[in-house]
Image (tube, rainbow, N blue to C red):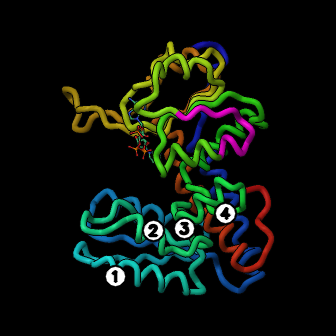
Amino acid sequence: MAEGARIIDGKAFAAGLRARIADAVPAFEAATGRAPGLAVVLVGNDPASAVYVGSKGKATVAAGMASFEHRLPATATQAEVEALLRQLNTDAAVDGILLQLPLPGHLDEQAAVAVIDPDKDVDGLTPVSAGRLALGIAGMVPCTPYGCLLLLQDRLGDLSGKDAIVVGRSILVGKPMGQLLLGANCTVTMAHSRTKDLPALVRRADIVVAAVGRAEMVKGDWIKPGAIVIDVGINRLPAVQGETKGRLVGDVDYAEAAAVADAITPVPGGVGPMTIACLLRNTLVAAHRRAGLADPEGF
Ligand code: NDP
């Protein structure tokens, strides 16, 4: 690894953020007589989704917040899912609503997400939240890109004038990441599967955010010396001899990029832990706004 190249420890940063959130909960309770509440809706029996929902519930309780878990069968109808979301919209104890995706194939995800009250949209996925982000109006920002922004600001401070490239333009990660970087006064390039000469564009960037879903696609010789690399990708390689499961890797060739970059997030332990921490952050902020309180400081 080149001198100065550092690992951005998302796990430690997320633990600190979660501790600060837990510290802020008692003041909210003192002001309102209740803890902030997060409702998570799981439809069907997808094992990975069930694990995510379980970890979100545990993290919510660990932060001193109220966790409400709602499970609907895989056979639930669109009307049943939307009825539950509407009920949570009107539930005063619920500040944040998260609809765990993906939904079973017969359901319309976009239509279901759009039912969520934007002020409780802690995943930041409703059309109103996306619009607020684009317009620069206070709203709920998707957790993973917000976590990436926090890691970048922690490393660099002010991001003004930096050349940033976001590789990937998904609704969940790439697009909101681009908006956040633009909001932080970066000059932003959005790259995707039709982008021409991606390596040359990446080579110009001070900040590289990779959110593609292709194992180790971004190579070390694409990285400008001294750049900051944020690797959102989570890809499992095929198991090799002696392994029961293949290794988890990001979208960036870590060893190569770490030899050139100023700092880089590892996979796992980089961006991943920030997602749940930012979900709790969004729930805390949503609770304050719904109660008519000023946003908690330092988040
Ligand atoms: P999507 O599959 O929704 O989007 C992938 C994006 O990458 C698309 O915009 C696609 O372009 C682009 N892309 C595909 N191939 C190329 C290529 N060869 N060159 C340039 N761009 C390309 O993925 P997500 O955004 O949901 O997730 C991306 C990765 O991040 C995944 O590995 C996922 O597991 C991980 N992830 C991690 C999270 C975490 O907590 N750490 C949370 C969410 C996701 P186009 O639009 O043209 O098709």
Q: Nearer the viewer, residue 188 or 156?
A: 188
Q: Earlier in the sequence, mark 2 or mark 1?
A: 1
Question: Label 2 to label 3, Cα distance in Å?
Answer: 21 Å
Neighbor class of circle 2 (other Cα within 10 Å; few <14, some 14-19, many 20+) is many
Q: Kindly identify the amino acid type of the residue bearing the numbered disc 1.
A: Ala
Q: Identify the element where label 2 is drawn.
A: helix
The residue labelled by disc 3 is 60
Q: CA distance from mark 2 to mark 4?
A: 16 Å
Q: Nearer the viewer, mark 4 or mark 3?
A: 4
Rendered-image quadrant of the N terminus: top right
When the figure is inspected, residue 257 is found, relative to residue 145, above or below; the finding is: above
Q: Which mark is residue 13?
A: none
186 inside magenta stretch: yes
Amino acid tagged 2 = Val
Amino acid carrying mark 4 in the image: Gly
The answer to the question of whether label 4 and label 3 lie on touching residues, with beta carbons closer than 8 A, is no
Q: CA distance from mark 1 to mark 4?
A: 27 Å
Please say whether residue 269 is visible from this viewpoint.
yes
Q: Earlier in the sequence, mark 2 or mark 4?
A: 2
Tell me if residue 143 is in the magenta stretch: no
The amino acid type of the residue labelled 3 equals Thr
Q: Which residue is mark 2?
A: 113
